[in-house]
Image (cartoon, grey):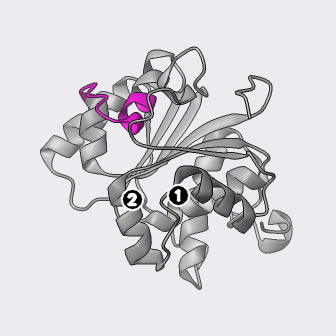
Amino acid sequence: MSHSLSRKTITLALTGASGASYGVRLLECLLRADYQVYLLLSDAARVVIATELSEEWPTEADTCARWLESRFQAPEGRVRLSSRFDWFSPVASGSAAPKQMVIAPCSMGTVSAIAHGASDNLIERAADVVIKERGQLILMPRETPYSTIHLENMLKLSQLGVVIMPASPGFYHQPRQLSDLVDFMVARVLDHLGIELPIGQRWGMDDAALGASV
């Protein structure tokens, strides 16, 4: 499928921080919202997915993309998975990359590389492109405690307009299972992206007001 400026597009990257379920759930929601997703996976992300979710994703890019589309009942071609050194991917160029990108979860190594403009792999380059093109970049770090180095890197990115959204779910909605905590954070990301998809429970709203969940 050719890159289409008319289709809703977004770049989603998963890195090696703990919290793979955030990125997987966000992928599902983006596909349900009819987005074409340029998906980027670090090698460490695959290890975390296998460890935390007990899932072995196909290693070949096209096979994995079709597998994910089938899993989330998305039309063929909605997931475009690129290898970490695929410099011909649209996300590597400001003339073709989506204007929105989310890294969930985002490791501190990735935060550092983006903050210093390393661009040593496609995830870092894609983030660099979004920043230079004045697009919307959302990072969901999952680390504790933060060192001074971590905080300085995140401050630098925040001053550049990057949204730093730590995986720190609230508990006022009285979560009953882990998926409730995951949905809390994914819903916040969707809010910032301007995507209306009713998942999770908002402050001051009961389930009836929220409507049917995805």
Horizontal arrangement in the rendering, residue 52 relative to residue 90 (left or right) = left
Residue 194 image offset from top left, x and y in percent: 70, 39
Q: Is residue 205 a member of the stretch shown in magenta?
A: no
Which quarter of the rendered picture does the C terminus lie within?
bottom right
- Residue 169 seen in this snapshot: no
In this rendering, the answer to whether 43 lies above or below 139 is below
Which quarter of the rendered picture does the N terminus lie within?
top right
Kindly indicate whether the residue at mark 1 contacts the one at mark 2 (C-beta within 8 angstroms). Answer: yes
Residue 188 image offset from top left, x and y in percent: 59, 52
- Disc on the earlier residue, 2 or 1: 1
The quarter of the picture where residue 193 lies is top right
In this rendering, the answer to whether 12 lies above or below 178 is above
Q: Amino acid at mark 1?
A: Gly
- Give, as a single range, the part of the protein colored magenta: 116-127
Find numbered disc 2 in the image and state the secondary structure of the residue it sits on.
helix
Horizontal arrangement in the rendering, residue 11 relative to residue 214 (left or right) = left
Q: Which residue is mark 2?
A: 45
Residue drawn where x is 43% and y is 61% of the image: 168
Residue 12 image offset from top left, x and y in percent: 54, 45
Residue drawn where x is 50% and y is 75% of the image: 55
Neighbourhood count class around disc 1 (C-alpha, 10 Å): few under 14, some 14–19, many 20 upward: many
Residue drawn where x is 26% and y is 35% of the image: 113
Q: Which residue is mark 1?
A: 23
Q: Nearer the viewer, residue 123 or 195?
A: 123
Horizontal arrangement in the rendering, residue 121 relative to residue 8 (left or right) = left
